[in-house]
Amino acid sequence: MERRMENVVIVGSGPAGYTAALYTARAELEPLVLEGFAWGGLLQQTTDVENYPGFPEGIMGPDLMSKFRAQAERFGARLETDDATAIELSADGSEPHKVWVGDEVHLARTVVLAMGAEHRKLGVPGEEELSGRGVSYCATCDAAFFKQATTLIVGGGDSAMEEAIFLSKFAAKVTIVHRRDEFRASRIMVDRAREVPNIEWLTPYAVEEFSADGDGRSLAVARLRNTVDGSELSVPVTGAFVAVGHEPQSHLVQGQVEVDDAGYVVTQGRSTRTNIPGVFAAGDLVDHTYRQAITASASGCQAALDAERYLRDNPAPAGGVAGGAAGVAGD
């Protein structure tokens, strides 16, 4: 039995994956989207989204992703709610790329990698239960919900300093909690944070537990432990922002596509091209700077256009039955 060779296989969902699916579907490329069991990406873990254009009243994160998903499907994207389990890329593009879901293999002329990145978590009691109810991983996204609140930032890198400075514009008090007296952040970022009057510092402390208020609905207390003498401290807070980094989900392609020291996939110039012909990457998998839904969506559009042009300029390799047209659509 001949296996269908897909024009485009998109691995992952979220704003990048679904936007790539929308654009390639409108180009009649019949993309196959391996969206994963946890489809929708990090926005599925977000409550109110107030900074995505077109929704003046705001929208819940899962609702926004449902709209992305439905729009891509409307134009012919084929969604498979399963996780890719292995990827084998053709180093020179002369053979089809292969993407497995369990024992089933999909042949692909182009692959769009949109697996995203996961927030690195503390792994302490109460963190998971209070996520979205006081515990957050993005001050840029959620700071406006904590106006005049008492908050803390956990972390010691540049991202933690940036998050603290941004949050300080909304919160009454921001306390930076770090397990060491020294910071990984650059000196200039630490100095900027120290100049902000409503930012305070607690070092060397580590978070031991997040606790809810009396009715169990929202964050009320962060229990901290001094990493030198072991003493404990309970800090009343209504908002806690964990800024200890991200984990790009690039494990399926490491050793095949170029990644940086942190595991983010490297793309060429302003494009979404990787070092493998016919393989493109978008969204938080490549972006450790902005990490916003709108920037991920924009890069998904770029990946789709890059994939269309690749298909236009490169004949189909042997090894399968092509599915769908390969023309480039306009706007």
Image (cartoon, rainbow, N blue to C red):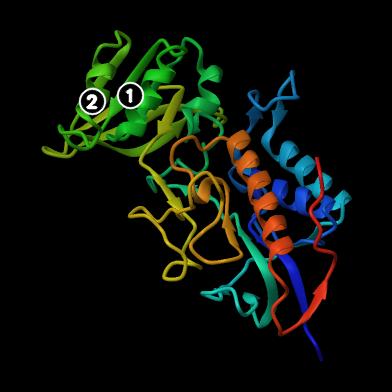
**Quadrant holding the N terminus:** bottom right
Q: How far apart are the two marked residues, 2 and 1, measured between alpha carbons? A: 10 Å
Q: Are marks 2 and 1 in contact (CB under 8 Å)?
A: yes
In the picture, residue 133 is in which quadrant?
top right
Mark 1 residue type? Val
**Quadrant holding the C terminus:** top right
Q: Secondary structure at mark 2?
A: strand
In the rendered image, the vertical position of residue 224 relative to residue 288, given as above or below: above
Which numbered disc covers residue 202? Answer: 2
- Residue 81 visible somewhere in the drawing: no
| Mark found first going from the N terminus, 2 or 1 | 2
Mark 2 residue type? Leu
State the residue position of label 1: 235
In the rendered image, the vertical position of residue 115 relative to residue 147, given as above or below: below
Residue at point 41%, 44% (across, down): 125
Side of 21 where 157 appears, left or right: left
- Crowd tier of the residue under label 2, counting other residues whose Cα lies within 10 Å: few below 14, some 14–19, many 20 or above: some
Which numbered disc covers residue 248? Answer: none
x, y (%) of residue 126? 45, 41
x, y (%) of residue 173? 37, 13
x, y (%) of residue 217? 57, 30
Q: Nearer the viewer, residue 229 or 315?
A: 315
Q: Nearer the viewer, residue 25 or 139?
A: 25
